[in-house]
Amino acid sequence: RLTTPDTEIPSTIMTDRMTPFMTSALLVIALLGSVSPASALFKAKFEEPAAGDAAAPSLAASPSPSGRFTVTLDKQYVPVIRNNRTVMYKTAYFGNIYVGTPAQTFTVVFDTGSGHFIVPSSKCLSETCALHRRYERNLSSSAVDIDHDGNEVASDVEERDQVSVAFGTGEIVGEFSKETVCFAHSGLAPEEEGLVSAANASTLSPDCTTVRVVFATEMTEEPFAAFEFDGVLGLGLESLALDPEFSFMGQITRLNKHMDSYFGVFVSHLDEVSSEITFGGHDPRRISGDLRWTNVHRPELGYWQLKIKGIKIGGEPLELCQAGECVAIADTGTSLLGVPKQAAQHIHWLLARNVDGDPDELDCRGHPGPEIVIDLGDFQLTLGAEDYSRPAGLRVVTNTTNETQFICRAQLLPVDEGPALGDKAWILGEPVLRKYYTAYD
């Protein structure tokens, strides 16, 4: 979900969608700090790096004694410029992943809003692909080329089954292979890695699995040329993928009996403190209390989707969600707060405020504004102006009076999810994830 301020359709769309597979899931929310899918949130706990920690390698995966693996995420800012002025930044968080045998290193966005693992192929010769590392099929002894149904095909076949995956601002086309994917480098010598096949690769290390991968042969310039990461690792539920064997978390849970089936995401609001994703559990250092779990709503759709009981803006109920028909999707690949398209203009109006001062010197994130309170039943999520505001304000001149006003606005993503999710879907993107730790089971 590599969104820009002007994007209106943030969801991943498979053009060749298979019948959804039923799953159970939980989502947990903890203010940063069942066996049906669940998710949880809690208040995030931000810790300054301890003395001596500054030398820790970026983008590295590190195991803990409990069997969890934590991948450190790098952050990239891409400026959005209007009239020679930077009005905001697009952001992306990405970390290392290792593909094939011997391991080939790629940087990926860990995206809870999509269902496939995608990296560029050496067959992609476009200028966009040339900016990134590309997977070399002939260098891996563990690769098995497959068709759409998972049947093995010869590696020298020229005409291959392909899939097209559309993101909010771009698209890729790719071929399928079954391949070994790991959080960390194996540490084996090249001659030892050369003995590994797809059949036994996932047994070498608890941080590896065998999964079907989409190797992109075409990638659009927008958004992939602007960002440094190579690909996307989808962490949505299995029903969001073409087949369960495309599901990274599904595969690593099935094939690795020593790893718990959930992961936690910590998005830091400080550049000095790295963001992280932890597999096999959550990182208790990053929260200041217990996780609050809730069942995922309609997991057959594949999204980490929550039922919203109601929403208040500035203390007043939002009529759109009063009947309890709104839903929210926790999406680590979206950089903004997504709001239903039908209500976007009204919500913008509710969150706008007049401020005094020089617009070229003020940061709207520092000026008070109405709170957004999202009621999830047993707990509430609260966002302030510092969370949702565009940094740069807007100068408005009234034609009739020539009066000038300076207005601070929200940066929101209009969401039109179509018939599956309905027209009352919200997306809990980076503004929520910076404030709340999220875990996904």
Image (cartoon, helix red, strand yellow):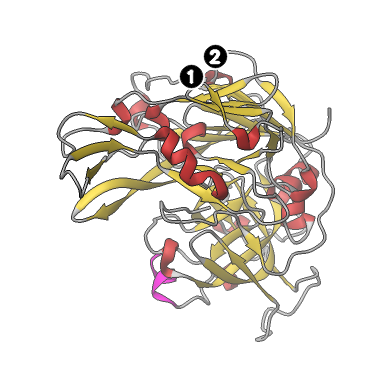
Q: Give the magenta part as a residue range.
A: 126-131
**Crowding at label 1, few (<14), some or many (≥20) Cα neighbours within 10 Å?**
many
Which residue is at a point 39% across and 74% down the rendered structure image? Answer: 127
The image shows residue 205, relative to residue 416, as above or below, that is above
Q: Amino acid at mark 2?
A: Ser
> Quarter of the image holding residue 305?
top right
Spatial CA span between label 2 and label 1 = 6 Å
Magenta span contains residue 218: no
Most extreme residue toward the bottom is 158
Which residue is at the front of the view, 345 or 257?
Answer: 345
Tag 2 secondary structure:
loop
Q: Is residue 152 visible?
A: yes
Magenta span contains residue 127: yes
State the residue position of label 1: 45
Which residue is at the front of the view, 137 or 424?
Answer: 424
Please identify the dominant SS of the magenta region: helix
- Expressed as whole percent of the image width and height from the top left, the position of residue 104 reads 53, 58
Tag 1 secondary structure:
loop
Say if mark 2 contacts mark 1, CB within 8 Å: yes
> Quarter of the image holding residue 121?
bottom right
- Expressed as whole percent of the image width and height from the top left, the position of residue 326 reads 67, 38
Which residue is at the front of the view, 175 or 410?
Answer: 410
Q: Is residue 318 left or right of residue 78?
A: right
State the residue position of label 2: 288
- Expressed as whole percent of the image width and height from the top left, the position of residue 356 reads 20, 28
Which residue is at a point 42% across and 19% down the rendered structure image? Answer: 47
Q: Is residue 94 visible?
A: no
Q: Amino acid at mark 1?
A: Lys
